[in-house]
Amino acid sequence: MRRHGLPPHPGRRPLRTPQPTGPDPAEEAADTLARVTTSTPDTPWGDVRLHVVTGKGGTGKSTVAAALGLALASRGKNVLLCEVEGRQGIAQLFDVPPLPYEERRLVQGPADGGELYALAIDPESALLEYLAMYYRLGRAGKALDRFGVIDFATTVAPGVRDVLLTGKVYEAVRRNRRKKDARTYDAVVLDAPPTGRIAQFLNVNNELAGLAKVGPIKSQADVVMSLLRSRRTAIHLVTVLEEMPVQETADGIADLRRAQLPVGAVIVNRVRPQDIAPADLESAAAGQLDAGRIATDLAEAGVEDDPALVAGLAQEARDHAERRALEDAQRRVVAELGVPTYELPLLPGGVDLGGLYELAGDLAKQGLA
């Protein structure tokens, strides 16, 4: 499995790695992340052990969760990045083989801290582990799995499924350092289900109300809820500056508050650059850009004057201005949600490993990690 190195921090020994033959975008981004995190003030999220990341589908929540895990690890923390939807999104982002149901190191930091591990949690494996741990049904549990009983139990009772998934996350957060050979973490980042069902997923007591009022499953749900409703947990919502995702974010915040679950931050992803002067934006939106000025600028850049090209650029500018106006309107809506807000830029080339480090640096610089 490919492992990536974290940038060194002051007072920590850097890894000894072979020198690349040419510039590596991921390494360059890691160096930038190192410079950012060494100059960033303490985060207001210092007491949080569990960062839950949710968002409407298509907003890039898995990317943001991975970037947050990297940002936390860059501060010298041991971090576990979990996913529960069976999509293997973490493996794709870090360009590694599909993750099994065991903790695998993705990023190796200095010997005294700063490592990122990942875990893909599936309910069937979590139930087998639960049966082995609490009922000592090792071989019997595997026999049940062969007969389809495990799949039946986790499908017919979705409340049990969610308890098992969140229970594994709880175990990682609360793992005791005194336990022999136990790998402990300073922070856990959960790439959670989408905003539309995040309150239902996390509010496991309600889900179990009609299934189990007593017994070990109910007891596990109670201890999980004690963590999820504490100040050690923050639920961050990812959105983009479009009407539907922003509205779903507002609805998600309301759902979480009704369930008495702690709302963290709103992370606005894929924000377009704001490098055009307001006056030029107004002219572009009104279709009043000076075609002669555009042609002159093209000539100065060595591009032959072409009326069709000038007209096409003017139309693109108008589309951009209209898009910016819509985004600014949604940004005002986000500001009225009353929660801390962070922004991540749109990466023109998409998100590769170097881009992931860049986003991690942005989160660290803004103080989310």
Image (cartoon, helix red, strand yellow):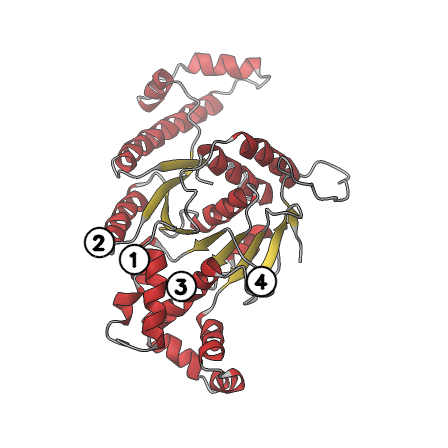
Residue shown at the point (40%, 63%) measured from the top left: 166
Q: Which residue is mark 3?
A: 166
Q: What's the distance in space between the residues labelled 4 and 1, CA to CA? A: 28 Å
* Near-viewer residue (115 or 242): 115
Residue shown at the point (66%, 45%) measured from the top left: 110
Q: What's the distance in space between the residues labelled 1 and 3, CA to CA? A: 12 Å
Residue shown at the point (38%, 71%) measured from the top left: 161
Q: Which residue is mark 2?
A: 258
Please tell me which of labels 3 and 2 falls first in the chain: 3
Q: Position of residue 277 (x, y in %)?
A: 39, 18
Badge 1 vs badge 2, beta-carbon distance below 8 Å: yes
The disc labelled 2 sits on which kind of residue?
A: Arg
Classify mark 3: residues with Cα within 10 Å, few (<14), some (14-19) or many (20+). many
Q: Is residue 325 left or right of residue 345?
A: left
The disc labelled 1 sits on which kind of residue?
A: Ala
Q: Which residue is mark 1?
A: 199
Q: What's the distance in space between the residues labelled 3 and 4, CA to CA? A: 21 Å
> Quadrant of the rendered structure where residue 258 is?
bottom left
Closer to us: mark 1 or mark 3? 3
Classify mark 2: residues with Cα within 10 Å, few (<14), some (14-19) or many (20+). few
Closer to us: mark 4 or mark 2? 2
Q: Which mark is residue 210?
A: none
Please tell me which of labels 4 and 2 falls first in the chain: 4
